[in-house]
């Protein structure tokens, strides 16, 4: 009589070669307060969570080609500790419960999106397209010839030249802005054009994301009366392979704002001084340039803040900096436990952002005073 095969022991478990599902996304290391974390996301269900460097070391090696014993040996060399069977069972149970392992239960279908219209008359959102990613993909295919690095580089140089000319004509532009504030009809026309520039800004984020391998989750209209703006949600920018790709997605909106101004700049330059249309265009160029350049400031929720976070590989930079500074004021010993890099970044950002806000406040007050007195 043949007996049942023995249950696999630790050696049997360590011989397994599990693999993550190929579409699971893993982020680069991100500083979050005093800790370093990695983001893990299932793009099918949309679920995501954070893991530490040690867990990432293990999870990132689950590719189906290496056994748990092989990965355990690498882990012991890296961290000076060998994992037991219980550690592996706990990790695999976590990944299995989240349906991230290949060969396991299929991932849960993403929760259906809410109603296209959500909110009240005073505040809410309106989803404008059913499939934002497909819509952005079509726009990307149409614009792909313009996204060649040589073309983009040339356009960037033209935009920089435009801004240099406008900076040299700042007095004329400021006078035109004061003139515009006292004329409702031209003011409404400029405001409408700036709103269109804002919509272009949002679409640019989505097109840039598609160009570097990202996906777009939603395109719509968000309002908090009396303001209503377009929005475009990029789902997986944190998981793009290269830092420059993340920076390109974040910077695309401001670049699109500058491109929007180029034909108006040519029109303005062709008109004689004193022409009423030239005044309107000058005010548009001033406000449009401010719209683009202010967006590059490293303050939340502006694109410059997102770019700084990508560049430094930091998540939640502003709240983490605020938390560190509060801790530093009440418990210097606890603040000293932060890694040196975290202490430098959070102190530098906290002081720098405070100084920047003061300068912006003073500059805005000066601009309002100048416009009111001219």
Image (spheres, helix red, strand yellow):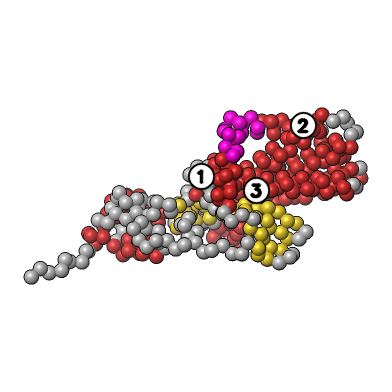
Specify whether 193 is left or right of 140.
right
Q: Is label 3 in contact with label 2 (beta carbons under 8 Å)?
A: no
Query: Above or below — where is 8 with respect to 175?
Result: below
* Mark 2: few/some/many CA within 10 Å (<14, 14-19, 20+): few
Quadrant into which the C terminus falls: top right
Which residue was labeled with disc 3? 202
Between 197 and 371, the residue placed more toward the observer is 197
The residue drawn where x is 80% and y is 41% is 284
Tell whether position 148 is magenta. Answer: yes
Q: Position of residue 169 (x, y in %)?
A: 81, 33
Does label 2 or label 1 sit earlier along the sequence?
Answer: 1
SS of the residue under disc 3: helix
The residue drawn where x is 82% and y is 46% is 189
Magenta segment's dominant SS is helix
Q: Position of residue 354 (x, y in %)?
A: 70, 51
Whole-number angstrom distance, CA of label 1 to CA of label 3 = 17 Å
Whole-number angstrom distance, CA of label 3 to CA of label 2 = 24 Å
Q: Position of residue 219 (x, y in %)?
A: 62, 53
The answer to whether residue 199 shows anywhere in this view is yes
Q: Position of residue 149 (x, y in %)?
A: 57, 32
Which residue was labeled with disc 2? 266
Residue 272, by quadrant, is top right
Which residue was labeled with disc 1? 213
Residue 280, by quadrant, is top right
* Mark 1: few/some/many CA within 10 Å (<14, 14-19, 20+): few
Which segment is the magenta one? 142-156
């Amino acid at each position: 009589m043949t007996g049942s095969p023995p249950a696999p022991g630790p050696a049997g478990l360590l011989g397994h070669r599990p693999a993550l599902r190929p579409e699971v996304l893993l982020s680069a290391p991100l500083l979050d307060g005093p800790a370093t974390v990695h983001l893990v996301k299932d793009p099918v269900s949309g679920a995501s969570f954070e893991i530490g460097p040690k867990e990432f070391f293990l999870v990132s090696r689950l590719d189906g080609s290496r056994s748990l014993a092989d990965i355990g040996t690498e882990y012991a060399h890296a961290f000076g500790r060998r994992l037991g069977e219980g550690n592996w069972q706990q990790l695999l149970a976590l990944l299995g419960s989240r349906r991230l392992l290949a060969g396991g239960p299929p991932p849960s279908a993403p929760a259906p999106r809410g109603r296209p219209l959500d909110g009240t008359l005073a505040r809410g959102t309106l989803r404008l397209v059913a499939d934002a990613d497909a819509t952005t993909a079509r726009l990307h295919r149409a614009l792909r010839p313009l996204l060649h690095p040589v073309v983009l580089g040339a356009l960037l140089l033209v935009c920089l030249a435009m801004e240099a000319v406008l900076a040299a004509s700042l007095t004329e532009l400021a006078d035109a802005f004061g003139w515009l504030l006292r004329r409702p009809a031209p003011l409404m026309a400029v405001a409408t054009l700036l709103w269109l520039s804002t919509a272009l800004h949002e679409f640019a984020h989505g097109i840039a994301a598609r160009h570097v391998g990202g996906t777009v989750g939603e395109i719509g209209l968000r309002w908090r009366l009396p303001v209503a703006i377009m929005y475009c949600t990029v789902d997986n920018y944190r998981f793009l392979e290269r830092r420059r790709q993340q920076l390109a997605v974040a910077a695309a909106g401001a670049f699109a704002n500058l491109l929007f101004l180029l034909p108006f700049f040519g029109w303005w330059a062709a008109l004689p001084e004193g022409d009423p249309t030239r005044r309107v265009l000058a005010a548009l160029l001033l406000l449009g340039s401010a719209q683009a350049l202010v967006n590059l400031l490293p303050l939340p929720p502006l694109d410059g803040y997102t770019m700084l976070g990508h560049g430094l590989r930091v998540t939640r930079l502003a709240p983490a900096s605020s938390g560190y500074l509060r801790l530093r004021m009440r418990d210097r010993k606890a603040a000293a436990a932060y890694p040196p890099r975290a202490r430098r970044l959070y102190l530098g950002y906290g002081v720098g952002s405070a100084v920047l806000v003061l300068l912006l406040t003073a500059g805005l007050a000066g601009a309002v005073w100048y416009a009111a007195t001219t």
